[in-house]
Image: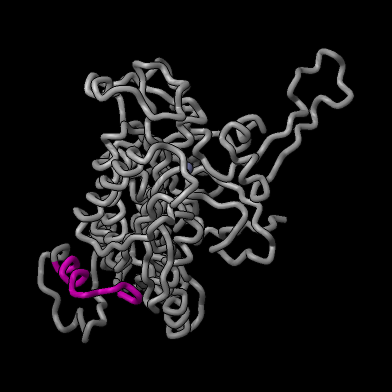
Amino acid sequence: MSPGSPLLLPNGAYVFQKLQDFLRAQYPQFGYKEVITPTIYKKSLWEKSGHWENYAEDMFSVQGRGATGRTENAQAGEDEEFGLKPMNCPGHCLLFWGEGELKSYRELPVRYADFSALHRNEISGSLTGLTRVRRFHQDDAHIFCRPDQILSEIQQTLRFVGMVYDTFNLGPYKLLLSTRPEEHYIGTLEEWNRAEEQLTSALNNSGREWAINEGDGAFYGPKIDIILKDATGKEHQTATIQLDFQLPQRFDLQYQASPEELEVGPISAGDKNIDSSCRRPVIVHRAIYGSLERFMALLIEHYNGNFPFWLSPRPALIMTLNQTPQVLEYATRVQSALAGISGLSHPSDAREGTEIKPTPQQLSATHLPIDIDSSARALGKKFHEARTKKYNHVIVVGTEEVKSQTVRLQITNQTNDGTVTKIISEVLGRPLTEKDDKNGNISVGVTVEEARRYFLRLVEGFL
Ligand SMILES: [Zn+2]
C-alpha cells in the first residue's frame, strides 16, 4: 500500500526519467553539481533548520526502534526521533559546511542539485492524482552565493527557466516578485533593498512580463514565482526562485570575505556570531519544474496525451502484416535496431542452447521504447488501437518488407509543422513525392537504418 504517493507504470516512469535526464544534461552548462542526500535526518537537524518548530505538522517523523531493552553496549541515539525530509535545504547546508575547508569568496557560487524523494504529510482529503501527493520529487537546487552575486545568479536561473519551458513549448508565463513583509522579517533593511534591487534588475533584463506582489515575500527573503498559463487559460505556479537570509544564519554558514567586502565594513546587526574576516552566503532555493509529478500532470494536459517523440513513452509501434516466422523474426530485428540496442540483438534471440554474450551499452546511447503488435487481428483494428494509444509512429512490416529489407514508416500522432517532413526528406536524400505524403498523411518506405536516423534527428531536435 502506498497512501498518497503515485505508482508509476513503465510508461509514466519513462516520462519521469526523461524529465530528469533532460535537466541533468543541462546542469553542467549552468554549473550545478548533482548530489545525493539522505531521506531521514535526526530531529536535532530539523530543530536547527527551524522545521521542527514551524513545519512539524507537515512532516513525517520516524522512530528508531533499536535501543529499547538493549544492553548498555547499545549505542546512544538509536531510539532517537528522526524526520523524513520535506525539503533538501538543510541537507545541502550540511554539505556546504562539510565539504572541507572554509570556502573563499572566489569559490562561490556553489550550486547543488538534488532529485531526492521528499515527503510531506498532506491531509488525505487534499491528495489528488499526480498533482498533490505525499511523496514526490523536485528538481530542487540550492545556490550558495555572495550577496553581490544575486543579480547574475537570478538572471542565469531565469534564462534556465526560459530555455526549459521553450523546449517543452510551455508558455506564456509571467513572473511575480514578492517583496519584504511590512513588519516581521530577518536581516537588515539595506540587505533587503539591495537584494530586491538585484531581483528587479534581473526581471527587467529578462524581457518577460512581470508583476510585483508587495510585502508578500517570506520573512526570510524575497522570491520570484513563475506562473504558467495552460491551454485553457488556467494559471499554475510551477518554478520558484527564493532568496534566503535565514538558513545561512541558522547553520552558521560562512565564507572568507573578499577585500572589497571587508572594506564595506561589519555585517548586519543581529548576526554577531560571525568571524570578522568572514561573510554569510545567501541561499537561493530554486526549482524549475517544481514537483516532477505535478509537472508531468501538466504536460499530459498540455500535450493532450500526444507527447513529442523525444519524450514519448510510445514513440513507435511495429505492426506485422502476417504471422509467418520470417516476418516475426524480422520485426524483432527491426525493433532492436530502432530501439538502439546493440550487441545482443534482442532478448527474443536467446534461444535454448545458444550462448549470448552481453556487451556494455554506450552511456550516450539513445534507447527508445519501441513496441511490437504481432497479433493476428485485422490491420484496421491494430491501427485504430495504435492511434488511440497515441503512438507517434507505426512501422509496418510484411513479406514485401522482409524481401526488400525495408519498413513502411507512418506518422500517426507526431506533430508535423513541416519540420518532420523536411527531416524525412533529408534522411532519404530526396524530396517526398505525392505517394509518400498524401495531404500530410506520411507513409514512406525506408530502410531500418534510415528510420533510426530519422528517430535520432527527432530526439536531437526535441521534436
Ligand atoms: Zn530549499
Which residue is at 68% across, 49% downward?
57
Quarter of image, res 269: top left
Which residue is at 55% across, 52% downward?
136
Residue stretch in magenta = 411-425
Q: Position of residue 26 (x, y in %)?
A: 30, 45
- Say if the magenta span includes residue 424: yes
Q: How is the image coloured?
A: one colour
Seen as rendered, the residue at the extreme top is 73
The correct choice, above or below, for 395 with respect to 280 in the image is below
Left or right: where 12 falls relative to 60: left
Quadrant where the N terminus lies? bottom right
Quadrant where the C terminus lies? bottom left
Foreground residue among 351 and 269: 269
Q: Position of residue 326 (x, y in %)?
A: 41, 65
The correct choice, above or below, for 414 with respect to 21 in the image is below
Let me know if residue 101 appears in the view. Answer: yes
Which residue is at 59% across, 31% downward?
48
Q: Position of residue 438 (x, y in %)?
A: 21, 85
Which residue is at 26% across, 45% downward?
198
Seen as rendered, the residue at the extreme left is 430
Foreground residue among 318 and 9: 9
Let me know if residue 334 appears in the view. Answer: no
- Say if the magenta span includes residue 303: no
Foreground residue among 282 and 455: 282
Foreground residue among 374 and 123: 123
The correct choice, above or below, for 254 with respect to 53 in the image is above
Quarter of image, res 319: bottom left
